[in-house]
Image (tube, grey):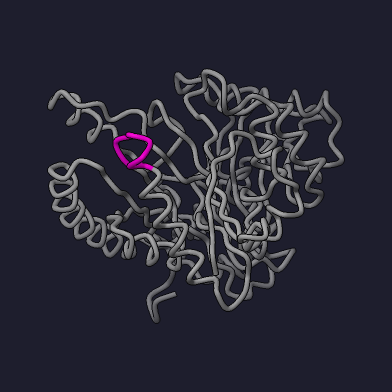
Amino acid sequence: MRLHTNIIGRLAQLPTADWDALDTAGNPFLSHAFLEALEACGCVGGDSGWEPHHLVLREESGRLVGAVPRYRKAHSWGEFVFDWSWAQSYARAGLAYYPKHLAAVPFTPVTGPRLLVRPGADAGALRAALAEALRQDAGRAGVSGTHANFTTPEDQLALEAAGFLRRHDCRFLWQNRGYRDFDDFLDGFRAEKRKKLRRERRRVAESGIVFRSLAGESIEPPLWETIFGFSERTFLLHGSAHYLNARFLAAVARRRPGAVAVKVAERDDVPVAAAIFFQGGSTLYGRYWGSAAREDSLHFEACYYQGIEHCIAHGLDSFDPGTQGEHKLARGFEPTLTQSAHWLAHDGFRIAIARYLERERAAVAEYVAAATHHLPFQRGPAP
């Protein structure tokens, strides 16, 4: 098979059907609709520091057989695999860490394919070709390196074979073990943990708040503005600006019916909070949330318990509520390893970072083992 690569600066240059024919494992964030809407709505490109630089792989006939959603980065914001200390080390050595190349979904710390290939017997060879092309293109472009965040095992193997380094981190995921309902899920908890969760849910109900489930495509623009406003307030309270905008959320929901679900919290029929979820394959992804004012236990109810109930009701296998947060352990979210791949052009830094990553992987493994002991489940076989 004779293949050639090229770079595109806008996903709109590719037909939707061609991109979506690649294997994304049902991940909604890798769809043409999601990634192209980021560009069309101004969330990436311009002065955002995320310059689309997608790598595409074609057969000699011109048929698209592989692609990598990739960006030329001027900073490390919105990545959730933190390399700020690497950038500082480069600066102390008088070297430039930025720009760099990043294969990822902007602002979306969700594991999924990064080396997108046509399904078939030659999928492994296509992944290897994409991994090698990423490294070679970074060398030609003169960037400090190229990175792939939140990789799948198949992609990680191909990237490491091309000379990338492995990095580990930990996140917390909920697993559906055939629960009949939320009470069935809680029955597996130790008594004191079960009482705490029920108390949190009771506080929200007693405050007069009820939840309404909405399909994203059914939401009109004015309500999207309200929902986005809640989420934007959360960002502002943490001292940062929102990565997205209401126009983007409405566009994705319209173009991907069934992919976006919103839980709206209301008191006396007036929205007071909302949580935004994406759904793809057999997984629910919690992405953004916010409220008009601080409400006791509302964050846990909107972001976690409503999501768990949604998974049980719809037979979904897992729930990824987002990054960080050891408080998720007490609510039944289990520590899970994530991985990413990194290639640095500078030989000295590549060797130094490889040594650092070896120590970091050991520390992450210890953390995951320790965190497992803090799960709320009753004693007995490991869940």
Residue 157 coordinates in the image, percent (x, y): 37, 67
Give the side of residue 126 with respect to residue 213, left or right. Answer: left
Residue 330 coordinates in the image, percent (x, y): 43, 55
Front residue (pair 365, 71): 71
Front residue (pair 279, 128): 128
Number of numbered discs: 0
x 52%, y 22%: residue: 48
Residue 205 coordinates in the image, percent (x, y): 69, 42
Q: Considering the image in quadrants, where does the N terminus appear? A: bottom right
Location of residue 276 with respect to 67 vertically, above or below:
above
State the residue lying farthest toward the bottom.
381
x 19%, y 30%: residue: 90
Location of residue 263 with respect to 367 vertically, above or below:
above
Residue 145 coordinates in the image, percent (x, y): 31, 41
Q: Considering the image in quadrants, where does the C terminus appear? A: bottom left
Magenta region includes residue 140: yes
Location of residue 198 with respect to 218 vertically, above or below:
below
Quadrant of residue 7 in the image? Answer: top right
Quadrant of residue 165 in the image? Answer: bottom left
Give the side of residue 379 with respect to residue 34, left or right. Answer: left
Give the side of residue 258 with respect to residue 137, left or right. Answer: right
Magenta region includes residue 137: no
Quadrant of residue 232 in the image? Answer: top right
Give the side of residue 221 with respect to residue 114, left or right. Answer: right
Residue range corresponding to the magenta coloring = 138-145
x 34%, y 64%: residue: 372
